Image (cartoon, rainbow, N blue to C red):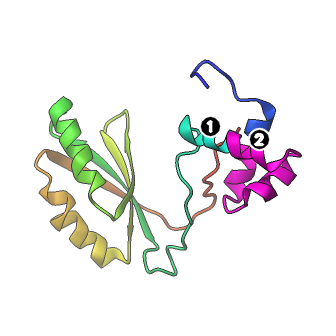
Amino acid sequence: MSPNEKLDKVDLQILRILQENSRLTTKELAAKVSLSSTPVFERLKRLETNGYIKKYIAILDADKLNQGFMVFCKVKLQRVNYDIATEFARIIADIPEVTECYNISGSFDYLLKIHAPDMKYYQSFILNVLGRIEYLASLESVFVMDVIKHEYNVHI
Protein backbone atom coordinates (compact mmCIF):
# COMPACT_ATOMS: atom_id res chain seq x y z
CA MET A 1 0.00 0.00 0.00
CA SER A 2 1.50 3.28 -1.04
CA PRO A 3 1.14 6.38 1.15
CA ASN A 4 -1.48 7.69 -1.30
CA GLU A 5 -3.71 4.63 -1.01
CA LYS A 6 -6.61 4.87 1.38
CA LEU A 7 -7.65 2.25 3.86
CA ASP A 8 -10.93 0.58 2.98
CA LYS A 9 -13.84 0.09 5.36
CA VAL A 10 -12.66 -3.40 6.37
CA ASP A 11 -9.16 -2.10 7.20
CA LEU A 12 -10.71 0.62 9.36
CA GLN A 13 -13.02 -1.91 11.01
CA ILE A 14 -10.02 -4.14 11.82
CA LEU A 15 -8.17 -1.18 13.35
CA ARG A 16 -11.20 -0.17 15.45
CA ILE A 17 -11.64 -3.71 16.77
CA LEU A 18 -7.94 -4.10 17.57
CA GLN A 19 -7.94 -0.81 19.50
CA GLU A 20 -10.53 -2.35 21.81
CA ASN A 21 -8.91 -5.78 22.09
CA SER A 22 -5.58 -6.54 20.44
CA ARG A 23 -5.51 -10.06 21.91
CA LEU A 24 -8.07 -11.39 19.46
CA THR A 25 -6.84 -14.25 17.34
CA THR A 26 -6.89 -13.84 13.57
CA LYS A 27 -9.81 -16.26 13.47
CA GLU A 28 -11.80 -14.21 16.03
CA LEU A 29 -10.99 -10.99 14.20
CA ALA A 30 -12.01 -12.55 10.87
CA ALA A 31 -15.39 -13.52 12.32
CA LYS A 32 -15.98 -9.95 13.51
CA VAL A 33 -15.31 -8.50 10.03
CA SER A 34 -17.07 -11.34 8.16
CA LEU A 35 -14.01 -12.57 6.26
CA SER A 36 -11.97 -15.74 6.39
CA SER A 37 -8.71 -15.88 8.36
CA THR A 38 -6.32 -15.70 5.39
CA PRO A 39 -7.38 -12.29 4.02
CA VAL A 40 -7.56 -10.87 7.55
CA PHE A 41 -4.06 -12.18 8.27
CA GLU A 42 -2.81 -10.56 5.04
CA ARG A 43 -4.51 -7.27 5.91
CA LEU A 44 -2.98 -7.33 9.41
CA LYS A 45 0.49 -7.90 8.03
CA ARG A 46 0.02 -5.06 5.54
CA LEU A 47 -1.27 -2.71 8.27
CA GLU A 48 1.71 -3.62 10.46
CA THR A 49 4.27 -3.34 7.63
CA ASN A 50 2.90 0.05 6.55
CA GLY A 51 3.03 1.38 10.10
CA TYR A 52 -0.69 1.74 10.81
CA ILE A 53 -0.23 -0.66 13.72
CA LYS A 54 2.85 0.38 15.67
CA LYS A 55 2.79 -2.26 18.40
CA TYR A 56 0.60 -4.38 20.62
CA ILE A 57 0.76 -3.58 24.34
CA ALA A 58 -0.79 -4.37 27.70
CA ILE A 59 -2.11 -1.31 29.54
CA LEU A 60 -1.08 -1.51 33.17
CA ASP A 61 -2.67 0.03 36.28
CA ALA A 62 -0.15 2.63 37.48
CA ASP A 63 -1.81 2.93 40.91
CA LYS A 64 -1.51 -0.80 41.59
CA LEU A 65 2.17 -0.63 40.58
CA ASN A 66 2.83 2.32 42.92
CA GLN A 67 3.40 4.68 39.97
CA GLY A 68 0.09 6.53 40.15
CA PHE A 69 1.47 9.99 40.96
CA MET A 70 1.18 11.61 37.54
CA VAL A 71 2.71 14.93 36.56
CA PHE A 72 2.80 16.95 33.37
CA CYS A 73 6.08 18.84 33.35
CA LYS A 74 6.60 21.75 30.96
CA VAL A 75 10.25 22.20 30.02
CA LYS A 76 11.96 25.29 28.64
CA LEU A 77 15.48 25.03 27.29
CA GLN A 78 17.99 27.90 27.41
CA ARG A 79 18.15 27.81 23.64
CA VAL A 80 17.11 25.38 20.96
CA ASN A 81 18.93 24.23 17.87
CA TYR A 82 19.14 20.90 16.07
CA ASP A 83 21.97 19.48 18.19
CA ILE A 84 20.41 20.51 21.51
CA ALA A 85 16.96 19.22 20.50
CA THR A 86 18.46 15.90 19.34
CA GLU A 87 20.45 15.51 22.56
CA PHE A 88 17.42 16.39 24.70
CA ALA A 89 15.31 13.80 22.86
CA ARG A 90 18.02 11.16 23.39
CA ILE A 91 18.26 11.93 27.12
CA ILE A 92 14.47 11.88 27.61
CA ALA A 93 14.12 8.60 25.67
CA ASP A 94 16.38 6.95 28.28
CA ILE A 95 14.42 8.14 31.34
CA PRO A 96 11.85 5.48 32.31
CA GLU A 97 9.72 7.80 34.46
CA VAL A 98 8.97 9.92 31.38
CA THR A 99 6.23 8.02 29.58
CA GLU A 100 5.43 10.68 26.98
CA CYS A 101 7.30 13.67 25.57
CA TYR A 102 5.98 16.25 23.14
CA ASN A 103 7.74 19.15 21.44
CA ILE A 104 5.20 21.94 21.89
CA SER A 105 4.63 25.53 20.86
CA GLY A 106 4.19 28.41 23.24
CA SER A 107 6.29 29.58 26.16
CA PHE A 108 7.72 26.10 26.82
CA ASP A 109 9.56 23.77 24.44
CA TYR A 110 8.49 20.33 25.68
CA LEU A 111 5.70 18.68 27.63
CA LEU A 112 6.61 15.56 29.59
CA LYS A 113 4.24 13.07 31.18
CA ILE A 114 5.90 11.57 34.23
CA HIS A 115 4.82 8.71 36.49
CA ALA A 116 6.23 8.46 40.01
CA PRO A 117 5.31 6.84 43.33
CA ASP A 118 4.81 10.12 45.21
CA MET A 119 5.75 13.79 45.58
CA LYS A 120 9.01 13.08 47.42
CA TYR A 121 10.18 10.82 44.57
CA TYR A 122 9.17 13.46 42.02
CA GLN A 123 11.11 16.15 43.90
CA SER A 124 14.22 13.96 43.83
CA PHE A 125 13.61 13.20 40.15
CA ILE A 126 13.47 16.94 39.32
CA LEU A 127 16.69 17.66 41.23
CA ASN A 128 18.73 14.59 40.27
CA VAL A 129 17.50 13.69 36.79
CA LEU A 130 15.89 16.58 34.92
CA GLY A 131 17.89 19.16 36.84
CA ARG A 132 21.13 17.72 35.44
CA ILE A 133 20.19 18.39 31.81
CA GLU A 134 22.70 20.95 30.60
CA TYR A 135 20.47 23.28 28.55
CA LEU A 136 17.50 23.26 30.93
CA ALA A 137 16.24 26.79 31.64
CA SER A 138 13.03 26.18 33.59
CA LEU A 139 10.36 23.66 34.53
CA GLU A 140 6.71 23.99 35.46
CA SER A 141 4.94 21.02 37.02
CA VAL A 142 1.22 20.37 36.79
CA PHE A 143 0.03 17.63 39.17
CA VAL A 144 -2.84 15.40 38.10
CA MET A 145 -5.52 15.25 40.81
CA ASP A 146 -7.96 12.97 38.95
CA VAL A 147 -8.15 11.38 35.51
CA ILE A 148 -11.49 12.18 33.89
CA LYS A 149 -10.84 10.62 30.49
CA HIS A 150 -7.86 8.66 29.28
CA GLU A 151 -8.23 6.98 25.91
CA TYR A 152 -5.58 5.21 23.90
CA ASN A 153 -7.75 4.89 20.81
CA VAL A 154 -7.35 7.06 17.74
CA HIS A 155 -10.74 8.22 16.47
CA ILE A 156 -11.13 6.67 13.00
Residue in the image at 69% along x and 41% along y: 42
Q: Position of residue 76 (x, y in %)?
A: 24, 43
Residue in the image at 22% along x and 45% along y: 88
For label 1, the crowd category at 10 Å Cα-Cα, with few meaning under 14, some 14 to 19 and many 20 or more, is some
The quadrant of the rendering that contains the N terminus is top right
Residue in the image at 32% along x and 64% along y: 96
Looking at the rendered structure, the kind of residue marked 1 is Arg
Residue 23, quarter of picture: bottom right
Task: Give the mark nearer the N terminus: 2 vs 1.
Answer: 2
Residue 39, quarter of picture: top right
**Residue 130 magenta-drawn?**
no
Looking at the rendered structure, the kind of residue marked 2 is Pro
Q: Position of residue 128 (x, y in %)?
A: 16, 67
- Up the image or down, 154 lies above or below 58; here it is above
Provide the residue span drawn in magenta: 14-42
User: Residue lying furthest right in this view?
Assistant: 34
Q: Position of residue 127 (x, y in %)?
A: 17, 66
